[in-house]
Image (tube, helix red, strand yellow):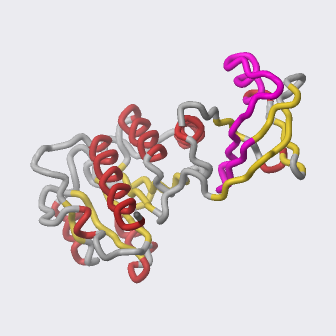
Amino acid sequence: MADRTFSIIYPENIHGNSFSLNDDESHHLGRVLRKKSGDTVWLIDGQGMAYEGLIEELHPKVSGKIIKSHKQFGENPRDVHLVLAILKRTALETAIEQATEMGARSVTLLITERIVKKQFNRTRLEKIVKSSSKQCGRCQFMEITGPVTLNELTKSINFISSTVFGCHWIGESSISSILKNSDSSIYCLIGPEGDFSSGEIEILQSNNIHFATLGDRRLRSETAVSTALSVINETMIGRNS
C-alpha cells in the first residue's frame, strides 16, 4: 500500500463521478506531495467509502473524476469496540492512534478509580483519528465516545449479540481462545496504568465479563491496546481465511 496516497473527501464534495478537495487536502496533494494532473489519488470519506480518483485540476483546488469506489475499504470484518480507561495525554493519544490503525470501530473512554484525570481533548483525539485513517488507508473514522463509568458501560452493551472481555493478569484464557467460536461484535476492556481495582473487577465479573491474559509481563495501557487489537485482528483473519 506504499504507492497509495490517501486524502479525505467529504461527501458533500462528491457530485456524481466528480470530486473536489478542500483547501487543506488540496494543499497537501499539490504543494507537499507535488501531485500533477493525470495522477491517481485514493480518497476516503470517513463514512465507509473509499474511491480511486484521477486528478484533472490542481488550482484553485484539487478536483477530478472518480474511476472506482470501494465499500468498507480497510475495515475489519467485524465491529471491534475498545473500552479504554482515560490515560495521561501522551499515552491516550498514542492509544487512539494505534486503535485507529488497528481498525477499532469505536473507543469508549472509561472513568475508573485509578485514572489520574477525567478530562481529555476530544477535538484533538478526533483530529488524530482522521490523520491516522489517512496514513493507514481506512475509510471509516473511528468513533470516540464517553466518558462513562463501568456501571453505565455494562448497561449499554448488548451482551446477547456481543463478545465482551477485559484484559488483566488474572485472566486464564487467551484472547484467541475467547474469540474462537465467536462471530459477534467484540468489546475489549483495558484499564489504566494502575489497572482495574478489586471492586471494578467484581463489577465486571458480576456481569459475566471474563478476563483474557496478555502474558506475564506488565504492559503499559497503550501497549496493551496494540497487543490486544493485534491478536483480535489475527484471530479474525484466521476465521475469515
What is the quadrant of residue 37 in the picture? top right
Query: In this rendering, would 172 be left or right of 178?
Result: left
Rendering coords of residue 116 (x, y %):
31, 41
Q: Tell me if residue 174 is in the magenta stretch.
A: no
Query: In this rendering, would 143 be left or right of 112?
Result: right
Whether 214 is drawn above or below 185: the answer is above
Of the pair 105 and 93, the residue shown nearer to us:
105
Query: In this rendering, would 76 be left or right of 164?
Result: right
Rendering coords of residue 179 (x, y %):
30, 69
Rendering coords of residue 218 (x, y %):
15, 44
Quarter containing the N terminus: top right
Quarter containing the C terminus: bottom left
What is the quadrant of residue 41 in the picture? top right
Q: Tell me if residue 51 is in the magenta stretch.
A: yes
Which residue occupies 19% across, 62% down?
Answer: 174
Whether 161 is drawn above or below 54: the answer is below
What is the quadrant of residue 150 in the picture? bottom left
Which residue occupies 85% across, 36% down?
Answer: 64
Residues drawn in magenta: 25-52
Which residue occupies 73% across, 52% down?
Answer: 69
